Image (spheres, rainbow, N blue to C red):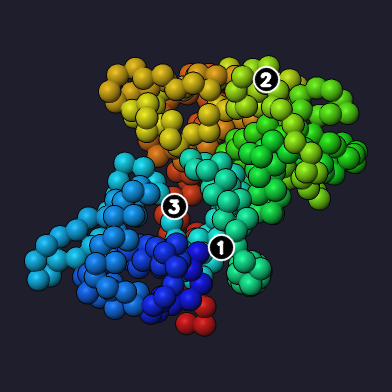
Amino acid sequence: MSGDRVAGVAGADTPARLFQLLSLLQTPREWPGAELAERLGVSRRTVRRDIDRLRDLGYPVRASRGALGGYRLVAGKAMPPLVLDDEEAVAIAVGLRAGAGHAVEGVEEASVRALAKLEQVLPARLRHRVSALQIATTALTSGDGASIAPETLTVMASAAAGHERLRFAYRAGDGTQSRRLTEPYRLVSTGRRWYLVAFDIDREDWRTFRVDRVSDPFATGARFLPRELPQGDAAEYIRQSMRRGRHQSYALDVTFAAPAEFVTARLPSTLGTVEPLDANHCRLRGTVSDSIEWLAVRLAVADCDFTVSAPRELVDCVRELGARLTRASAPPARGNGPDPSPAGA
């Protein structure tokens, strides 16, 4: 990441000059060759050679001819590395940290991986700015799950990606405290909470851990060869663990008046499998252990019409919720509602 404004760099070595050239090109505009040469303090011929080097590294640089022609970085087939200045790096880190504390659906795991990579290379002075900004701001809205420190997620994500043993303190559902030494496999978001799937060294078995009950996680530095997960898929393992851990589960059967791709993108995968019925309808079936009230609300915010066939408890809950929302949206009877005039009028 380039921390300062790009200035003349006559005499700079080629790698440093390439990074500075890349930083300029990543600004969304057309750069005339003469202006790039002036900024970098080199000849236009050197600029052309450096452009060719960037192309060899996979950066899709397009050149246009004419009096107004120049160079522009365009979208390619693969995502090349980005060069960020200080302000851009801080802005991205703050945004990722703000969203990482809740299990936001859709890109939650990718966001945590990106945050872990970014914070690994942030200079100390930028880390301080990111932390100060987050402390000084408060979100008006939040997710419907427990809040989690972004540092907890990034430490876990880095340990899992690097196949490094992870030690942490854990509070069980009954309040029992323990210390765990694990081989982290994968972080999974259910839409409300984060879970860690890991092999527990002391118990010699696979375990799931609610991340909001984890404290003081740190990577030990000891590497491990990843084991094969029994279910083969971390999300499926979490789903089965939740079924075993709850006293009551429900067979879910819901039909949506929307394409399968639309519904899949808006509901957590832990609810079950979405199967297309036709181009504009699909069906969700699965076994769930979440609260009936949460299921009703979660389905309602999927942003499409749906019909619940099972379980019966969910049918009743959706009907009651719909009636309550209808009453809430109806205008109050004249003379019975609160005085609509502003206070002090």
Vertical position of residue 145 compared to residue 287: above or below: below
Of the residues shown, which amino acid type is indicated by label 3?
Answer: Pro
Closer to the camera, 221 or 21? Answer: 21
The residue at the point 51 percent across, 72 percent down is: 3
Which residue is pictured at 65% across the width and 43% down the height? Answer: 157
Depth-wise, is mark 1 or mark 3 nearer the camera?
3
What residue would you read off at disc 1? 94
Of 171 and 41, the residue lying toward us: 41
CB under 8 Å between callouts 1 and 2? Answer: no
Tag nearer the camera, 3 or 2: 3
**Residue topped by disc 2:** 228
Q: Quadrant of residue 251?
A: top right
Q: Check disc 2: other Cα within 10 Å, few if <14, some if 14-19, many if 20+.
A: few
Question: Residue 109: x and y, percent?
Answer: 56, 41
Frontmost residue, 111 versus 81 = 81
Residue that extends furthest to the bottom in the rendered view of this protein: 344
- Residues 286 and 101: in front is 101
Q: Is tag 1's residue or tag 2's residue first in the polypeptide sequence?
A: 1
| Horizontal arrangement in the rendering, residue 338 relative to residue 304 (left or right) | right
**What label sits on residue 81 in the rendered view?**
3
Side (left or right) of 214 relative to 335: right
Q: Position of residue 134 (x, y in %)?
A: 62, 66
Looking at the image, is mark 3 or mark 2 earlier in the sequence? 3
Side of 264 relative to 59 (left or right) = right
Task: Please give left or right for residue 312 compared with residue 66 in the image.
Answer: right
What amino acid is at disc 2? Glu
Residue 75 location (% of width, % of height): 29, 50
